[in-house]
Image (cartoon, coloured by chain):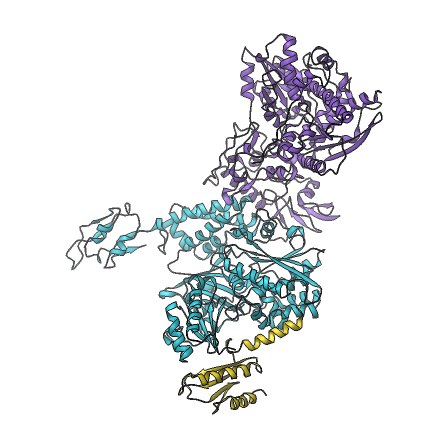
Chain colours: A yellow, B purple, C cyan
Amino acid sequence: MQIEQLNNIKNEMHKQFVNRLQENESTIKFCLGVKSSGITADKKALILSMIEYVSERFDNALVMFDSDLDDGLTVFCGGKTEYYGVNDFNAAKTVVDKYLA
Amino acid sequence: MVNLKINNIPVSVPEGTTILEAAQMAHVNIPTLCYMKEINAIGACRMCVVEVKGARSFAAACVYPVAEGMEVFTNTPKIMQSRKTTLELILSDHRKDCLSCERNTHCELQKLSYEYGCDEHAFAGAKSDKKPDYSTDYLVRDNSKCILCRRCVAVCNKIQHCGVINTKNRGFATEIGQAFDVDLAETACAGCGQCINVCPTGALHEKSEIDNVLAAINDPEKIVIAGVAPSVRVALGEEFGLPIGTNVEGKMVTAIKMLDFDKVFDVNLTADLTILEEANELIERLTKGGTLPMMTSCSPGWIRFLEYHYPELIPNLSSCKSPQQMFGAIVKTYYAKKMGVDPSKLYVVSIMPCVAKKFEKTRADQSASGYPDIDAVLTTRELARMIKKMGILFNDLPDSEFDSPLGEYTGAGAIFGATGGVMEAALRTAVETVSGKPLEDVVFSEVRGTKGIKIATYKAGDVSVKVAVCSGLENAKEICEQIKSGTCDYQFVEVMACPGGCVNGGGQPIVDAYTRRNVDVRAERAKAIYAIDDNAKKRKSHENTACELIYKEYLVKPGSHEAHKVLHTTYVARNKY
Amino acid sequence: MYRSHILVCGGTGCTSNKSFKIVEALNKELAERNLSEEVKVITTGCFGLCAKGPIMIVYPEGTFYHSIKVENVPEIIEEHIIGGKPVERLLHRENDGKVVNSLHETEFMKKQVRLALRNCGVIDPENIQEYIGRDGYQALAKVLTQMTPQDVIDVILASGLRGRGGAGFPTGLKWKFAKASQGPVKYVCCNADEGDPGAFMDRSVLEGDPHVVIEAMAIAAYAIGSNQGYVYVRAEYPIAVKRLQLAIDQAKEYGILGKNIFGTGFDFDLEIRLGAGAFVCGEETALMTSIEGKRGEPRPRPPFPAIKGLFGKPTILNNVETYANVPQIILKGAEWFSSIGTEKSKGTKVFALGGKIVNTGLVEVPMGTTLREVVFEIGGGIPNGKKFKAAQTGGPSGGCIPTEHLDVPIDYDNLIAIGSMMGSGGLIVMDEDNCMVDIAKFFLEFTVDESCGKCTPCRIGNKRLLELLTKVTDGTATLEDLDKMEQLCYYIKANSLCGLGQTAPNPVLSTLRYFRDEYVAHVVDKRCPAGVCKKLLKYSIDKDKCIGCGMCAKKCPADAISRTDYTAEGHKLASMAIDTNKCVKCGACMSTCKFGAVKKG
């Protein structure tokens, strides 16, 4: 195996490690509110697309359901919390992109 | 060169020298128990501990290499106390029947315990439960006296390549024994007895036949005949405080006569006889296309080794009996007839430097007269013990000569005791016979010496003979492998099981490890053997008139039908385990 | 992509608690609920909090479930995975009852710095890709393409990494000596024999992150100029052996072991060699002798293995935990590593906490952490409200640390100064109910059984030492015996051939040093203060508490209890009394008495 292949596997696995590791101070957490709706098929589809999207852009992030939040998206980053009233993937993408900077 | 200080005495030694060796150069002796030069250096017993300035713990001098500027202290109070404790611990698990032990007065543990003022009850406690092994005809192992120095294991594995004994169990239950806990008699033990020679205590010794011999001597119905091997006379004196390599033949014969043996004959004679038969056999094989190389067959330890490990090479062995067995055979046939005595009344005792000979006498096809050729075998050590026990003051004895008609020998017979001796004796006869011309020089120096394997080529008339001489079973194995794989072109091979030949046999006086550090025992004894040859009037076996007479009156000629019946034997393949 | 991962511990401890059945149940339940595409179940290595096994962690929340049974699985799936709410009842709680949501927040984990155990409890050890995903084999790649062998040795030297097997020899120095020796054949060995009773640090690394050992050994081989390695694993670790072999096979498949690694021309091959039940084979030279196929006995040194080791060739032997630190040192640098720990002991140390402690398990702390922090904060203190008495480090080679030294910062040199040693990491905690003489006897019985038998001081000396110690616990010793014992200890230490013998007397010496009063009580008063040594136990009846019901006498198998003439104030029947000459110390009377009138001591 060449080193290039090693790095390819590493990068691929980084994506797989989203929602897999312990969080620390630098973890960005994207929390989807499911208190009012419960974990529906729609919410599941949304979270899976978000996980896909986030994993390709961040090395240290979580995308999880929040059973204490009615709906929308709360983002915890660098000690600060921000709420976004988004409920679909396109809107969520925009929010995620904000944190890429 | 490395410079260091031993007890503040500066010494300068080559790199790789151990502290033990360096200390000797400063005239300082460090005690050892498990160390034996060229055989065992494992730092196990901890007797040789010394303080090395700056080191974390004590160093074992027998294995610790010197370094530039090292400062060694060999007898500080801490070290002396430690050594004393080590001995007391060994003694706490040692069966102490010193008063009647084989090795009383020449036991290495006893000697050191005395030097260090040990209290044998200092560490009283549980004893490890070890059962003795009496299973073989030739040696006894008593593990209740074993101090686990591993010297016997080293000699059996590293030197003799037999590997039938090793360490089993662990911790306090550690014991020297055989694989799968079988008795020694069930293994491929060659019976060379080298283990006995290196044992520091009474854990290993030959199976004694002294009582049987004394009983025979005291039996008015029996005529007890003694036959003494070449090597006994150059070592027996050591048991009486004489220097290593002293020839005590004269005193020895007197002593044996004083033991009330009816006749004292010389096995050197049958050594000559062996040569006459074997040289004839060799010439037959060389000229008529027999199995080559032919290999000598006088070492029973070597024969056992071959029967177990290389039975396919049995056809290479000479069919001649060993001098011991020929002796018994001739006594119970030729001599019995000559004296008009029924062989059943004869009790033949051979006195040998060997323990394997105790087994050899029980071999099949060794009863020329219908009775076993040999009735008892005593080692050199057993003879000494008998002499002391019967109150014979050996050192003051006058010299005597062997009895007739079986007392004459030539120098060729005498040198059987050293490695290369059989070969040289055979060459003297074979070369002269084949070339038809008297030998210019009877000395064949290429086959002398203590090197493991010696190879030489000689011309006998138009015939060229390539010979190999080896001693020690490691070298025997090497030669067998060469023969098996067809990578050698020897025609005649002499093999002795014991390194250095019979002078270093398993039945010879035991020399302690310290002396062995400084004296080449086998070389010193061999020197005495060759001196006998140098001073002998006759030096070729075919000049032995007693042997001539045996053929004239009885066996006709070497290789005859009669000779084959009496003086030749067979071998058998044996299974290891 | 999965929205949730459930990690279940598959270390030996949790496996013997049938954690694999929990994994089976999870997979079954997820399949039945059509969640297999959303939720993944992963078996990992040891999380460390073995007292609370089987352990399960659910991500992304990091919810920490403990003592899980198969019956809990449907509920967890229903409430947590499907319903989004963790099952409160099954969550780990601290000593004060406070619920902890994530493993990181526990008192157990807070002070730990997991370097050697970095991947344990995180990755699936049977999947090389997960290791690679956590920067696995990056260090090897860096070493082979950007560093010279000397560079590697310089980094390891500068990091201050010392052998984690117990001796604490500077790893960089060991590699330096081996590199300087003549090749071309040299060997890299890993000591995974882990013989100390109660130690399971190396086992956890091998079960949870076997690739880190492979990577480190390849790096070491490159540094010293070797192409062949051996991992000597004790045969009593079947899971570790299985996972390591699997890892080796996978590494070979991926071309990370074998010829021309990463196309750099460097060859390295690795094989496992199994132990056969001998503690002494954890000793460096005995281990090598064992690999050579001979009886596993130590050899005298010099020559040292770096000059003449396995098969007579230059060899380095390092402990599993030592190797586990190497890849990170390469990637993050020597300065990073040496910033952790104390001046002379850099980095962290893994400890296996056992004995009288709430949180039995595996912990990894920076050097310099105090014993107090390890026992009372991370370890959760002593159960049942008992008092701390001592902690034993270094197993049968180590010594005990009493209360007076609780605040000593743990590092190699400090521990030796107080009469103990770091050892491989076993840390057994003892409380007021432990007899220190009995503890010393326990360890000495072990070393006597494991002695190889080669040298006199250990083979016979330790046996006699044990006999003397048994006299003490049997109540037949004298004060002279105590002196004799002490002298014998120093003799054995100074004269033994190898580390086993040299350190076997340590538990005796260290308990004598700090708990001499207990020894004296056994010898002079014929009394065991902790009430452990059977032969010294005296059962007695408090005549004022005893109401005279006589139940004890009925239960006594030795007919040793009879009624006295004494009737206590307010009692109707006369009290019972035990005849200590007849008493067999079975304790039946004590367990029968409902009035607490039977005393032991």
Q: Is residue B288 left or right of residue A32?
A: right
Q: Is residue B77 above or below residue C46?
A: above
Residue drawn 74% across the image and 46% down it: B14
Q: Position of residue B397 (x, y in %)?
A: 65, 16
Q: Is residue B44 above or below residue B315?
A: below
In which quadrant will I find the C terminus of chain C? bottom left
Furthest residue in direction bottom, as rendered: A85
Furthest residue in direction top, as rendered: B340
Asked if residue B379 shows in the view, the reply is yes
B431 or B165, which lies in front?
B431
Q: Position of residue C238 (x, y in %)?
A: 50, 57
Residue drawn 42% across the image and 85% down it: A34
Q: Can you tell which quarter of the image residue C327 is in?
A: bottom right
C179 or C56, which lies in front?
C56
Asked if residue C69 shows in the view, the reply is no
Q: Is residue B496 above or below residue B390?
A: below
Q: Can you tell which quarter of the image residue B511 is in?
A: top right
Q: Position of residue B52 (x, y in %)?
A: 64, 50
Instruction: Report the label total.
Output: 0
Residue drawn 54% across the image and 13% down it: B218
Q: Position of residue B22 (x, y in %)?
A: 69, 43
